[in-house]
Each structure stands twice: as structure tokens, then as C-alpha cells.
Image (tube, rainbow, N blue to C red):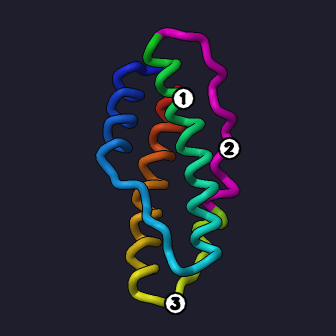
Amino acid sequence: MDRQAVQDAAAALRELPFPPSPDDPDLGDWIMDLLEADTYYAGLAQSALSGARFERPPERSLVELAVWLDELRVATPGDEAILEGCRAYFAALSALHEALRL
């Protein structure tokens, strides 16, 4: 594991606001799953950076979220802005995932 890469990826993720609640129920469900993944990876990063033993995340752990995100369509401009924020947040979370796998 590249400690600096994990620190950088975790810092980049912390700089982004977590997506707010949308009107679209499907996007809301996706954000709830994102919250679970975010919590999981934050814990892994903290464990890794503190020197504790941790299991590297499985390669496919974010695949379902990525596929679902690619399929999401929303109807309002407000939800479109939230969806764009979700894409940015997911990209940062994916970068943390990769840093933890190195």
C-alpha cells in the first residue's frame, strides 16, 4: 500500500460535499448505498493509515454502484446537479479504493 496515495485520496474525498437528498427516489436509493460504501472505505483508510491490519477491498466492490450510476436518469435540473455531484464523489471514492488496493 502506498501510504501517501491513500492519504491523498482520502483528503480529496473529504474535500467534496456528500450529495444531498434528491427528489428522485432511485437517485436517493443510490445515495444511500453510496453512504454505506463511503463509510466502509473511510474505515479502511483510517485502519490502513493507523498501521492496523486490514483486508484490501475486493476489486468488484464498487462495480454495482458504478453500473447503477451509469444507468440513472433524473427529470429535474436540481436532481441533475445532485447527480453530477454524485459522479464526482463516486470518482473520488473509486480513487480511494484504488489507493487501498496498491
Mark 2 or 3 closer to N-term? 2
Residue occupied by mark 2 = 61
The image shows residue 81, relative to residue 90, as above or below, that is: below
Label 3, secondary structure: give it. Answer: loop
- Estimate the spatial distance between the alpha carbons at disc 2 and disc 1, rounded to whole Å: 15 Å
- Estimate the spatial distance between the alpha carbons at disc 2 and disc 3, rounded to whole Å: 29 Å
Q: Residues within 10 Å of mark 3 (few under 14, many from 20)?
A: few
Q: Nearer the viewer, residue 59 or 37?
A: 37
Mark 3 or 1 closer to N-term? 1
The image shows residue 39, relative to residue 45, as above or below, that is: below
Mark 2 or 1 closer to N-term? 1
Residue occupied by mark 3 = 75
- Estimate the spatial distance between the alpha carbons at disc 3 and disc 1, rounded to whole Å: 34 Å
Bounds of the magenta span?
51-66
Residue 56: percent from left, percent from top:
63, 25
The three-letter amino acid code for the residue at tag 3 is Ala
Q: Residues within 10 Å of mark 2 (few under 14, many from 20)?
A: few
The image shows residue 87, relative to residue 15, as above or below, that is: below
Q: Are marks 2 and 1 in contact (CB under 8 Å)?
A: no
